[in-house]
Amino acid sequence: AAAAAAAAAAAAAASAETVMEDEAVDCGAPAVSSSSAPNAVGGSEAASAAAAAAAATASASSSSAAPRVPMSSEDDERCPVDSKEDEESCSDASEMSESDSVRRRREEDMVANPERAGELRLEGNEHFKAGKLHDAREAYSEAIYLTPSTQPKEKAILHANRAACLQKLGRWEEVVEDCKAAIDLDSEYLKAYCRRSIAYEELKRYHDAFEDLKKAVELDPSLKAKEHRRLSMLERKSQEQFEKDKEEMIGKLKELGNTVLGKFGMSCDNFKFEQDPNTGGYSVKFQQ
């Protein structure tokens, strides 16, 4: 009877240990190794000892496995779900940015007043003709604010008109900004390209000035006869500026190269650049 009781206790202990092992595996913790069941054929002392050992093992398994049920913060960091959540959060942030833009546009449209904007535009025109450039600029600025987003061409005209005021005031960077805004609203706005070309020229950005004038001539070929001299001049200055920028860049690269090659007893003078007259490309030759 004692042997049978011991065997039953050992079986119950082994069963409890197996349950705890399954729980630990589910939690992602290392599996708890199970001990073999005791031999029921031994005497009562062996059976009692085996039962006590099995009970102690079950108790130890219970106390060690229980804390592993909740996942630690490190486990959370290793969890692949986090990367998905990060992607979702980035996507949500992008959607929020777009929704913010839409909301701002709606808010602007809520205060829009097309009729008042038209009146301010006419007032700005009168101020401009009278030489009251600051008053004209203020009128155009308020008109821009009151023009709804559903009227992009009207808004483009207002930006170009304000750029005309700034042009008279010699504020070339702001002229570029307003003309860019006008072109963003109306990609075929001829006056905006012409005005920005002038601003770029004043800023000595000849390549940009040339490209804008080329675009203006593309939009209105009749301008070519009127602007052919300026077009040629900008093309020449654009090429000169390119060559100057290229020489400065090569000079800086040469200084850097000499610093590095000097450690090996060489310099950039050991390398000769030769231009191909047919392609305009360059080849490098080493010379002692």
Image (cartoon, rainbow, N blue to C red):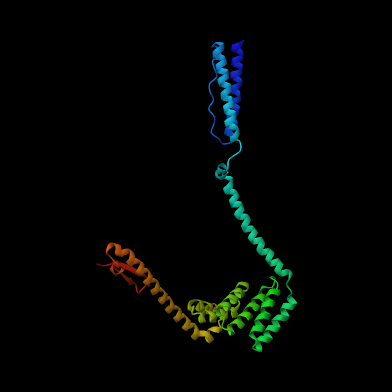
Q: Is residue 17 visible?
A: no
Instruction: Answer with the quarter of the image where residue 13 lies.
Output: top right
Relative to 261, is 242 above or below?
A: below
**Residue at the spot x=64%, y=83% of the render?**
134
Instruction: Answer with the quarter of the image where residue 282 lies.
Output: bottom left
Q: Give the residue furthest to the bottom.
A: 130
**x%, y% of residue 12?**
61, 21
**x%, y% of residue 61?**
57, 28
**Residue at the spot x=34%, y=66% of the render?**
257
**x%, y% of residue 58?**
58, 25
Q: Is residue 180 visible?
A: yes
**Residue at the spot x=61%, y=75% of the render?**
182
Instruction: Answer with the quarter of the image where residue 60 lies.
Output: top right
**Residue at the spot x=59%, y=52% of the render?**
87
Left or right: 220 in relation to 266: right
- Decide which of 104, 68 is in the foreground and name it: 68
Q: How many marks?
A: 0
Q: Give the residue furthest to the left.
A: 288
Q: Quadrant of the N terminus?
A: top right
Relative to 76, is 13 above or below?
A: above
**x%, y% of residue 196?**
56, 79
- Decide which of 15, 238 is in the foreground and name it: 15
Left or right: 178 in relation to 116: left
Q: Quadrant of the C terminus?
A: bottom left
